[in-house]
Image: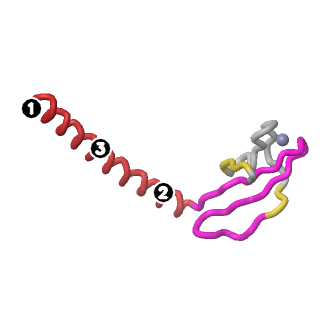
Amino acid sequence: MARKVDWNQEKGGCCPECGSERVPVSSSPPWRGGVKFRSHRCACGATFQSVQMSDEARLDEVSKLREVAVRTRAMEEELARLNRIFNYA
Ligand SMILES: [Zn+2]
């Protein structure tokens, strides 16, 4: 499996091995579901994939994370409540 890095708006795909920036793209399939993968082959011999998310997909992800955060907080409160009950029972 190819390693994955985040696509960087200024630096393109950066090699996870040697840190080279703007590593040439060897294949670039079309966008799918707001995400674009690019395959890179670095001069150092490393191959990897960069992942770029569209702004829409990013916002989607942020709102999903926010939902998870809210749910996590609710669970933590519930856990604290249960702990109080058990500790004082
Ligand atoms: Zn490299």
Res. 9 visible in picture: no
Q: List the residue tagged with mark 2.
A: 61
Q: Tell me residue 31's x, y (percent).
A: 66, 69
The answer to whether residue 68 is visible is: yes
Q: Which residue is drawn at 36% across and 47% down?
A: 69
Which secondary structure lies at badge 1?
loop
Q: Is residue 24 left or right of residue 52?
A: right
The residue lying at 18 percent from left, 39 percent from top is 82
- Give the mark, 2 or 1, whose residue is nearer the N terminus: 2
- Residue 84 as seen in the image, left or right of residue 31: left
Type of amino acid under label 1: Ala
Q: Which mark is residue 89?
A: 1
Q: Give the number of the mark in front: 2 or 3.
A: 3
Describe the element under mark 2 as helix, strand or loop.
Answer: helix
Q: Residue at x 15, y 29 (%)?
A: 87
Q: How far apart are marks 2 and 3 (CA)?
A: 18 Å
Q: What element carries label 3?
A: helix
Amino acid carrying mark 2 in the image: Glu
Q: Comparing marks 2 and 1, which lies closer to the viewer?
A: 1
Label 2 crowd (10 A; few <14 / some 14-19 / many >=20): few
* Ligand 1 image-quadrant field: top right
Q: How far apart are marks 2 and 1 (CA)?
A: 41 Å
Residue range (magenta): 28-54
Which residue sits furthest left?
A: 89
- Please rate how many residues cluster around mark 1, counting C-alpha atoms within 10 Å: few if below 14, some from 14 to 19, many from 20: few
Residue linked to disc 3: 73
Q: Which of marks 2 and 3 is nearer the N terminus?
A: 2
Q: Quick check: 72 above or below 25?
A: above
Quadrant in the rendering for residue 18: top right
